[in-house]
Image (cartoon, coloured by chain):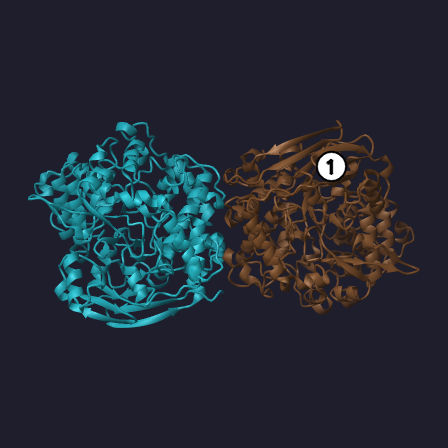
Chain colours: A brown, B cyan
Amino acid sequence: MDNGYNGKILRVNLSQNTISEETLDELFCRRYMGGAGFVTYYLMKELKPGIDPLSSDNKLFFMAGPLTGLSFSGSARHCVGAKSPLTGGYAKSESGGYWGSELRHAGYDGVIIEGKADKPVYIWIHDGEASIKDGSHLWGRNAKETESTIRTELGDSHIRVALIGPAGENLVSFACITNDLKDAAGRGGMGAVMGSKNLKAIAVRGSKMPKVANRDGLRVIRQWVTDNKALYAGLSEYGTIPAAGMQRGVQTGNVPIRNFRDGDFPITKIDTDTLKNTIRIGMEACYACVVRCKKVVEVNEPSLTVDPAYGGPEYETLGALGSTCGVEDLKAIAKGNELCGSYTLDTISAGVVIAFAMECYENGILTNEDTGGIDLRFGNAQAMLQVIELIARREGIGDILAEGAKRAAQRIGKGAEKFAMAARGMEVPMHDPRAKAALGLGYAVNPMGADHCLNMHDTAYTAVNPNLVALNSLGILEPLPATDLSPRKVNMFRYLTNYCLVRDSAVVCQFVPFTIDMFVDMVKAVTGWNTGTVELMKIADRIFTLARIYNLREGMTADDDKLPKRFFQQHVGGPSANTTPYEEEKLEKAKSYYYTLMGWDARTGVPTSETLDVLDISWASVK
Amino acid sequence: MDNGYNGKILRVNLSQNTISEETLDELFCRRYMGGAGFVTYYLMKELKPGIDPLSSDNKLFFMAGPLTGLSFSGSARHCVGAKSPLTGGYAKSESGGYWGSELRHAGYDGVIIEGKADKPVYIWIHDGEASIKDGSHLWGRNAKETESTIRTELGDSHIRVALIGPAGENLVSFACITNDLKDAAGRGGMGAVMGSKNLKAIAVRGSKMPKVANRDGLRVIRQWVTDNKALYAGLSEYGTIPAAGMQRGVQTGNVPIRNFRDGDFPITKIDTDTLKNTIRIGMEACYACVVRCKKVVEVNEPSLTVDPAYGGPEYETLGALGSTCGVEDLKAIAKGNELCGSYTLDTISAGVVIAFAMECYENGILTNEDTGGIDLRFGNAQAMLQVIELIARREGIGDILAEGAKRAAQRIGKGAEKFAMAARGMEVPMHDPRAKAALGLGYAVNPMGADHCLNMHDTAYTAVNPNLVALNSLGILEPLPATDLSPRKVNMFRYLTNYCLVRDSAVVCQFVPFTIDMFVDMVKAVTGWNTGTVELMKIADRIFTLARIYNLREGMTADDDKLPKRFFQQHVGGPSANTTPYEEEKLEKAKSYYYTLMGWDARTGVPTSETLDVLDISWASVK
């Protein structure tokens, strides 16, 4: 080994009221990297089979990576994981902001939460020390109140807080954990797991910079970011997507409209250019980042106020609470974003669940009796906002919808299931697989389900992408059409989803336009390891394979690697009417080839014993 | 693409007496690199199925790579390929010296020889011009005479000549093509193919340096070599193996002794230390190389002279003509080396074929009648030298042995086959798979057969290797025992044989101790491509898969991926008596897993259509 990075983990048992520390050896860190890699390892290693995700048997993992908290753009992220109450399987979700960096500055690379407190608590971590504190007075309070109360009582306004609002306390299956009010470990219901443990928040403060093996190497990266403003000027100006991207998304059928049913929508009413010119009051950054891609919006009208404390809606939120619900009112979308932030709800699942309810309502499957009189038509902005509140409080129709689209549809019956746009139980995000074929494969095989964080493989690297050269070092020398799902596309998909996974393990942001080779250079500089793309691909294979085994152990099979039927049956109308539906047979072939490339059985998707040996994870073998 | 290297090929049709030039586009060059990659492409693309290797239908490919002929250590190599008269399948073989560099300085990256001249000819290539010249006066002459005659008649003592001696003219199945008298494209019978075309030599002279995309990048490599003399001090002092390595090789069972039958041999009588202290008169270098690993020996005794013009015996030759034949007389081995150089015979096949004959003789399968009275016992140095001459002239027993051990055994019958130490018809080189398990897999699955040029994967990178760190970037973080053949070992084997193949395509020498990451840097500097290890691995997959398809098309199957039975049945005696025989079942399992990793059918070893698509070689599909 090269004498580089290792890690220190804080283990908090809320049942026993104990706190301990563990030091990870370097070989372990090199095999699992950090972030998503650590989460996956612990999930497989420490969770008993078949546990209820909302029982004290589940654990909640907060994991930074070797890149987290260093002073360069993109380093502000951490990963949260647990068994998902939404999917019943593997879940992990990354968040930006300041909290993860602060955790590393406090001397820790991760926190493992075990058990369940007998009354509400929060955890306070401060420069190598940690304690469990009473949180009864925080229970029921929204995100902003919680953060400010903790900061006040601990006497430090720079404390960073990861927390849940009422949606987490009420065990909404898609409750998220937010930190710094504006950033969320959004997907998979991590907030419900936190709520089930009576854990309201983790407050962190630290003052030490993590060690870096080669500071000069890091300086080169930092200089590159400074010198290449043009590459992220669009992000700095518009946030995670430029207005033109949203407009093109409607043309190509990528932007979901009215629960993925339609193709036409006046997107310019809610795009990022309109947002910039109306309600936006500024742009903010995560820790150490010069990109500054985070919108802040404010509305002060007699009938509607939006609190800038919760930032502003990113692309996924504009799509989920906007076009997916048929809502054309930008201010209402911003309000919805604020509500989700305040209650700690995942905006993607919230929007898609509400769109599901809207389509049920328009088809008579849900009635005014079910909705408590809410006129739940597509496009009704007020209805959208009302239902967010009902979900967070688990009141009326909200109590059913809080289970997520898949389980809600099962409970509603009457054919509602055909309107539940979820894969593996997770609501489909704002990229339509009918427009991006490899993404559909991703939704199907991703151990998370329909996760938006693997979407770079198709949008970013096909015919329209001028940066194809960045993939040349992977042997991808020619662009491939977005709707292609040939073996070479599946191969590219595997490389790029693998890249995403090590990126989420390092942990670093996808929006700073690092090439894969630069990413390798960053890991080398920070860890001191003589690593390379082949090793990083192997690390991702290891993590994906472990996650696969975890899901298999929990009872999932290749039959769960599925997309909602709508994608196979229906063309998208409107301007994208020429978009062909996804071909199920094509997906099945691509799945089988993906399994093969991963070293899993081509039919069952079960990792072979040879693959486990090569990946050093024979310990995780199932059966 | 990155606007870098492309290639220019000279095509010479000896039947039609025509010469033409072809320019290769950059995308093609990037997919096949050069050297072995180009050879493999043309072999599959241009040779008709089922041709006789010694007919005018065969073609002979001389291919440099993008690194050939540049001024840094290790750049002196080129690759020669054709359908093999020894194995009936794919063959390619690399050579050092000066010839390949000179070819690139003359403006060409490769020469394709087609057809057959109606009388002996040679080709003269000089700074962008080429001609076919009468070679009748050269026919029958040895290597040294041929080179000096050509230099004299063309009036330039710096002309570099690749040529065949009488063994090539006489179509000995393992005749090689030598250049600069001391370097050979040794394996697979390339010299016989050249002879079958009535082509005696290719003389080259050039004065232009090939273009380099990034001279500074190359300067860094050159400086690294200068600064790291300690890494190759042993090579500079002893040649391709230090004496201690040979001694350890006998202890571990790696050095073949008496046709791979025995374990005990007084190796210090013929090791590189003894050689240095007795007959060695100097060390020489290939073009631009500071390592200087090439021995020159001289003997001037009444009963024996050895001409220094042919250099001196490297490790493979010391083993093949020495311990494998039981010969303890270093001067006789040096004489054998000179004879093989002069006649242009592959020393490895020559030694193993003679050892085969010796074991047949000792077991009464060959008699004095067969040998023409030669007392062909193991250890009879004079007999060894006599048989070399008989083989080269195809006289007496030599005419049968000139077919190689496998076919000779078939012709001899009487159970001789059990003594034929060949895989896929190619004689096993001087590394015993009973001591190095992955190497045995290599001999079995290598499309060449038992090729010594893939041996780095096991010797160099197992428990004994201090440079394991160089493999870390491939995700290989822990040493594996030499006798291990687990999936992870097979995976390592694949990475490293793949590396060897791109190295042979670039083309660069294995003896300059570049790490894989430095090799990537060299390719980047020279070509300007934004390449990386993943792309290089894919290039190797492409070439190996094409070679596999070539052999399948020529009638080979998974049943040809075999080792001689002796390795499974017999322990090696003497000091290495504790060496276990190779387990056939272990090999079969490892083969199947190797097929899987390569994207070939796990049982038949036939590349899948998906693999062909990913590798951009669907055009080469068989059946």
Q: Is residue A125 left or right of residue A309?
A: left
Residue at the location (11% across, 42% down)? B371
In front of the other: A232 or B583: A232
Query: At label 1, which amino acid type do we have?
Result: Ile
Residue marked by disc 1: A125
Residue B445: x and y in percent read: 37, 46
**Which subunit holds the residue at mark 1?**
A
Residue B526: x and y in percent read: 42, 60
Residue B36 in view in this figure:
yes
User: On the image, which quarter does residue A565 sit in?
Assistant: bottom right
Figure disc tally: 1
Q: Is residue B283 left or right of residue B32?
A: left
Residue at the location (17% across, 49% down)? B338
Taking the view exactly as shown, the residue that stands out farthest to the left is: B302
User: On the image, which quarter does residue A256 sit in?
Assistant: bottom right
Quarter of the C terminus of chain A within the rendering:
top right
Residue A258 in view in this figure:
no
Residue A509: x and y in percent read: 65, 52
Q: Please, is residue B601 above or below residue B507 in the view?
A: above
In front of the other: A246 or B205: B205
